[in-house]
Image (tube, rainbow, N blue to C red):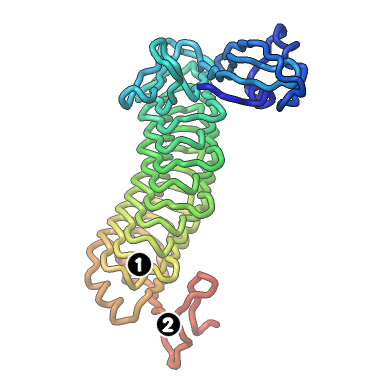
Amino acid sequence: MKKNVLLAVVLAGIIVSAAAIIVYNKLGGGECDSGHDFEHTIIVATETTDGFDGDICKRCGFAEGDILYATGTAGLLFMPINDDTEYSVSRGSVTSGTVHIPAYHKGENDDKYLPVTIIAKDAFNSQADITSVTFAANSQLETIDDRAFYKSGIKSITIPASVKTIGGAFDQCESLTTVTFAPNSQLGTIGNGAFRYTAIKSIVIPASVKTIDNVFNQCKSLESVTFAPNSQLETIGSSTFNNTVIKNIVIPASVKTIDEYAFRNTGLTSVTIPASVITIGNNAFYNCKSLKSVIFEQGSVLETIGQYAFSSSGIESIVIPASVDTIGNDAFWNCPITTVYYGGDEAAWDVLLKSIKGGNTPLTNAKDRYYYSEEPTTEGKFWRYVNGVPAIWSSL
C-alpha cells in the first residue's frame, strides 16, 4: 500500500525508535530548495501502532513509502473470507488480557493488506480472562458475530463506527458495565441477546439502529436507555428490556412494533407510545407494577394490543386510540384502571368493547371519555389533548 505522506501524518500512529530520531528532526514536510536528501527507514509495526517502510527526507521530513499496519494482539487467528478479499478474526491462542483488533491483516501469501471485517462467531467464547477489547482508530470492522465474546471478562467496550451488525455477541458478559458507540456509527441491527445478562447501567443507542431484539433482557442494573436524535428505530423486539430497572424511556417516533415481553417486569412509571406504533405484542408491559400512565400520541395508528399486554401493571388511566380493532385476552387484567380515554365516539367504543374477550373487566368498569377536538356544545364525557396529555373538557 504505497503512500506519499508528510512525516507528521506518518508519525501520528507510530512509535519512533531511538535510533531513528535523528531522521525526524524536521517535521515541516514539503519541498527542499536543493532537493530531498532521502534516507531509507523502517519502523516496525507493533500490536497497536502502525509502522513504516520507505524513504524520509532528512532535511524537510517528507516521506514516501508503505504503511505497515498494526498487527493486532499476538496469537490472533485470521481467516480469509469473501473470495479472499477480507479477513475474519478469532482468538487463536489468545486467552487473557487485552485484545486489540487491527484494521488490516497481511498473511504470508498476501501481496497486500486486506481489511479485517468480522469478529467470528464464538471468537472469544467463554474466555473469562479476556478483560478488554480495543480497535484500530480507522477500524474496518463491520460485524461482531454471535457469541463472539460470550461469557468473557470484558468490562467496557467502544464499538467502532464502521460496525453495521452486532449479533448475540456479548451475552452473559457479567462484568460488562459500559458500552459506547463511536460517533457517526453505521450500526443497523443489534441482534438477539447481544447484551443480555450484562451489568450495563446506561446506554445511548445510535440513530442508525433499526432493530433491537432481546438485547437487554435480564440486565438488572440497566436504568437509562437513550435513543440518539433522529433515531430510525422501527422494532423493539421480544424481551428487549425485560426485567430491567429502567423507569423512563422516550420511544422513538419511528417505532412501528413493540414486540412481546418487550418491557415486562421493568420499573417504568409512565410511557408514551408514538403515533407510528401499529402493534403492541403479547405481555409487552406485563407486570410493570410501577406503570401508572400510558399515553398514545395524537394521530396514533395502533391496531393491535396483544394478550396480557398490560396485565398486572399499575395503570390507572389509558388512552385507547380509535384505530384499535383488536384487544387480546387479559390485555388489562388485574389493572387498577379508573379512566379510559377513547379516541373515537361512544358508539365505536361500544362496538370495540363487544369484541373484547375475557379478562378485560378493568376497561368495561372504568369511566370512559370520548375524544372531541373542539369544545362540545352539550354536556358529556369528552376529552382532548393538551400538550400531549388527555384533559377533560368539562374541567378546563
Report the disc number at residue 32.
none
Q: Is disc 2 in contact with disc 1, using a CB cutoff of under 8 Å?
A: no
x, y percent for residue 54: 60, 15
> In 3D space, how far apart are the residues under numbered discs 2 and 1 (Cα atoms)?
17 Å
> What residue would you read off at disc 2?
372
What's the residue at 32%, 70% (across, down)?
A: 323
Q: Position of residue 104 (x, y in %)?
A: 47, 22
220 lies above or below 386? above
Nearer the observer, disc 2 or disc 1? 1
Up-down relation of residue 267 to residue 146 (above or below):
below
Judged from this view, the residue extending furthest toward the top is 19
Query: Who comes first in sequence, dot 2 or dot 1?
Result: 1
Label 1: few (<14), some or many (≥20) within 10 Å? some
Q: Is 157 drawn above or below residue 386 in the view shown? A: above
165 vs 271, nearest the viewer = 165
Q: Position of residue 153 (x, y in %)?
A: 49, 22
What kind of element bears circle 1?
loop
Residue 70 on image: x %, y %: 54, 18
In the image, 79 versus 310, the foreground residue is: 79
Q: Amino acid at mark 2?
A: Tyr
Picture quarter containing residue 380? Answer: bottom left
Q: For the residue labelled by badge 2, is the local secondary structure a helix, a strand or a loop?
A: loop
Residues 166 and 317: in front is: 166
Q: Which quarter of the rendered picture does the C terminus lie within?
A: bottom right
From the viewer's side, name the closer residue of 136 and 191. Answer: 136
Three-letter amino acid code of the residue under disc 1: Val
Q: Tag 2: Cα neighbours inside 10 Å, few (<14), some, or many (≥20)?
A: some
Residue 301: which numbered mark, if any?
1
Quick check: 183 left or right of 244?
Answer: right
Q: Residue furthest front?
A: 34
